[in-house]
Image (cartoon, rainbow, N blue to C red):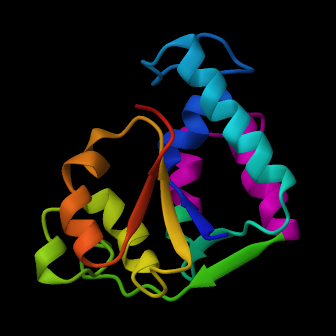
């Protein structure tokens, strides 16, 4: 089973299951439940590691939208204690993950995820719930061996 780079939107959507009306969530209640169940299963599966960059910029991004009371961040904290994998990521002068030129169209905030996945694309998947940017770049990512797991249709 692949290790997981979890996009912040997954944590936000999953958190809405236990905090109804949580801002930044514009998906159906069924979709929120789907993401919540995925996060709970991920939390409970010690064989599935959470992947973060070695500079902890992904973790910092999580904290821009979540706090320790949110379910999504509680899952991250559990994984930090139980099964964490860090990957080396180079950052440019603007603080964006360095990716190949063919992936330059990736949203700047997502480049750190892509740069981390490029270290081991066979064994690391990016997990998305509600960010359409990942779907728009799916072909370019697959050309580099990067798999994006889409939790929602």
Viewer-closest of 33 and 11:
33
| Labels in figure, total | 0
Q: Is residue 62 visible?
A: yes
| Horizontal side, residue 50 vs residue 58: left or right | right
- Quadrant (top left, top right, bottom left, bottom right) of the C terminus: top left
Q: Residue furthest front?
A: 1
Percent x, y of residue 1: 67, 69
Kindly report the secondary structure that dominates the magenta region of the rendered protein: helix
User: Does the magenta-highlighted stretch encompass residue 27?
Assistant: no
Which residue is depicted at the point 59% across and 49% down? 63
For residue 14, above or below residue 62: above
Which residue is depicted at the point 26% across and 82% down? 92
For residue 8, above or below residue 99: above
Percent x, y of residue 57: 50, 68
Which residue is depicted at the point 41% across and 35% down? 130
Percent x, y of residue 83: 81, 71
Viewer-closest of 11 and 96:
11
| Horizontal side, residue 56 vs residue 45: left or right | left
Viewer-closest of 93 and 112:
112
Q: Is residue 22 visible?
A: no
Using the rendered view, name the quadrant where residue 108 is placed.
Answer: bottom left
- The region drawn magenta spans 59-82
Percent x, y of residue 148: 41, 58
For residue 8, above or below residue 1: above
């Amino acid at each position: 089973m692949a290790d997981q780079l979890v996009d912040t939107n997954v944590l936000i959507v999953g958190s809405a299951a236990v905090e109804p009306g949580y801002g930044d969530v514009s998906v159906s209640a069924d979709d929120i439940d789907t993401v919540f169940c995925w996060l709970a299963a991920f939390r409970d599966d010690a064989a599935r590691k959470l992947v973060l960059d070695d500079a902890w910029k992904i973790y910092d991004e999580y904290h821009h939208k979540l706090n320790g009371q949110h379910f999504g961040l509680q899952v991250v904290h559990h994984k930090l204690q139980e099964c964490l994998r860090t990957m080396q990521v180079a950052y440019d002068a603007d603080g964006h993950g360095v990716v190949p030129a063919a992936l330059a169209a990736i949203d700047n905030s997502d480049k750190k995820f892509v740069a981390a996945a490029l270290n081991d694309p066979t064994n690391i998947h990016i997990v998305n719930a509600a960010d359409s940017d990942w779907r728009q770049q799916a072909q370019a990512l697959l050309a580099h061996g990067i798999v994006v797991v889409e939790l929602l249709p």
